[in-house]
Amino acid sequence: MFERPTSVDEASRLLAETPFAIVAGGTDFYPGLRDQWPAGPVMDISAIEGLRGITEEPEHWRIGALTTWTDLIEHPLPRAFDALKLSAREVGSVQIQNRATIAGNLCNASPAADGVPPLLILDARIELASGSGRRTIELGEFIQGNRRTARRADEIVTAILLPNGSTSGVSHFLKLGARKYLVISIAMVAARLNISAEGTVVDAAVSVGSCSEVALRLGALEEALVGKPVDDLASHVTAEHVSTLTPIDDVRASGQYRRDAAQELLRRSIVHCVSEVTNA
Ligand SMILES: Cc1cc2nc3c(=O)[nH]c(=O)nc-3n(C[C@H](O)[C@H](O)[C@H](O)COP(=O)(O)OP(=O)(O)OC[C@H]3O[C@@H](n4cnc5c(N)ncnc54)[C@H](O)[C@@H]3O)c2cc1C
């Protein structure tokens, strides 16, 4: 069975009756089939109206579920979104960025999904719709594990919401892979800092991906940065701060290498954020 609804209501009605597999850009969905068409029903959501684009609303920025990485790169956004834009440029190739959606990256819930760390530092919330209405849930609760999310079978993700209180400051994203492009990360980090006119950190948000089953915010490091002068800020990133990560050993890197890499990437991203403010 194959359906291509044109509205969220129609999609919700169909999902209430049948547990369709959802496909948006298809760049995770089709490679995941590995030459086998799925046994179950498929719903292509790419024709649903109103789900593509980025808008500023009174309480948050809204990224529609069909917004592609290229849409994001091309849309003017505050500097706090720089980390997210940098991650967009790292997703596959330009062809993938033109087709693939940000929401699809989150719903696929890979530990190496490039969109997750930069959305975590923006306190992203996920909006879901079903026949019984809409609900929102924090991104950190939405992704529950490797390929596991809190989405119910009758729900469709309609948007990613970035609350106004979390879209200030400057941000940066760094991804380490075995080569520069078209690569699954060994480790990646995102950092967002609010720095006062006097040169101290007012607010900090940092996250690490590919070093645990689900990308994580590092709360202890954030606390350690707040109130500190920006001179030599990176020296506050210690091995203890990355000790909460649980990276695996695999063909790309050992767990210890990943943890060391995360620490170094965090330092570099913090140095970059500081330079963005002090050189402005
Ligand atoms: C060559 C190649 C290179 C890649 N490189 C990278 C990379 O560097 N970094 C990276 O992070 N990813 C990479 N990817 C993975 C992929 O491109 C991204 O994860 C992309 O953002 C997925 O978006 P999509 O719209 O194509 O998702 P789809 O493939 O359409 O869907 C992915 C999953 O999300 C679900 N889904 C999608 N939209 C919704 C919705 N609105 N509501 C509910 N469920 C939904 C689908 O059911 C499916 O399970 C690469 C893929 C390829 C093929």
Image: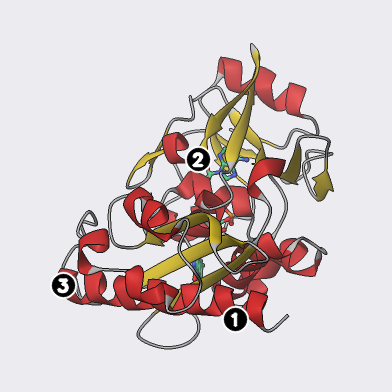
* Amino acid beneath label 2: Leu
User: Could you tell me which quadrant the C terminus lies in?
Assistant: bottom right
Between 186 and 146, the residue placed more toward the observer is 186
Residue 81 position (above or below residue 161): below
**Measured from the top left, where is residue 38 in percent x and y?**
45, 43
* Residue 243 sits in quarter: bottom left
Disc nearest the viewer among 3 and 1: 1
Between 67 and 171, the residue placed more toward the observer is 171
Residue 207 position (above or below residue 268): above
Give how far apart the Cα atoms at labels 3 and 2 are.
Answer: 27 Å
Q: Are marks 2 and 1 in contact (CB under 8 Å)?
A: no
Mark 3 is surrounded, within 10 Å at the Cα level, by few (under 14), some (14 to 19) or many (20 or more) other residues, namely some
**Measured from the top left, where is residue 115 in percent x and y?**
53, 58
Mark 2 is surrounded, within 10 Å at the Cα level, by few (under 14), some (14 to 19) or many (20 or more) other residues, namely many
Q: Are marks 3 and 2 in contact (CB under 8 Å)?
A: no
- The residue sitting at 32% across, 69% down in the picture is 237
- The residue sitting at 59% across, 36% down in the picture is 126
The residue tagged 1 is 275
**Measured from the top left, where is residue 11 in percent x and y?**
69, 27
- The residue sitting at 50% across, 25% down in the picture is 19
User: Could you tell me which quadrant the N terminus lies in?
Assistant: top right
Between 151 and 230, the residue placed more toward the observer is 230
Give how far apart the Cα atoms at labels 2 and 1 are.
Answer: 29 Å
Q: Ligand 1 is located in which of the four quadrants?
A: bottom right
The residue tagged 2 is 139
The residue tagged 3 is 256
* Amino acid beneath label 3: Gln
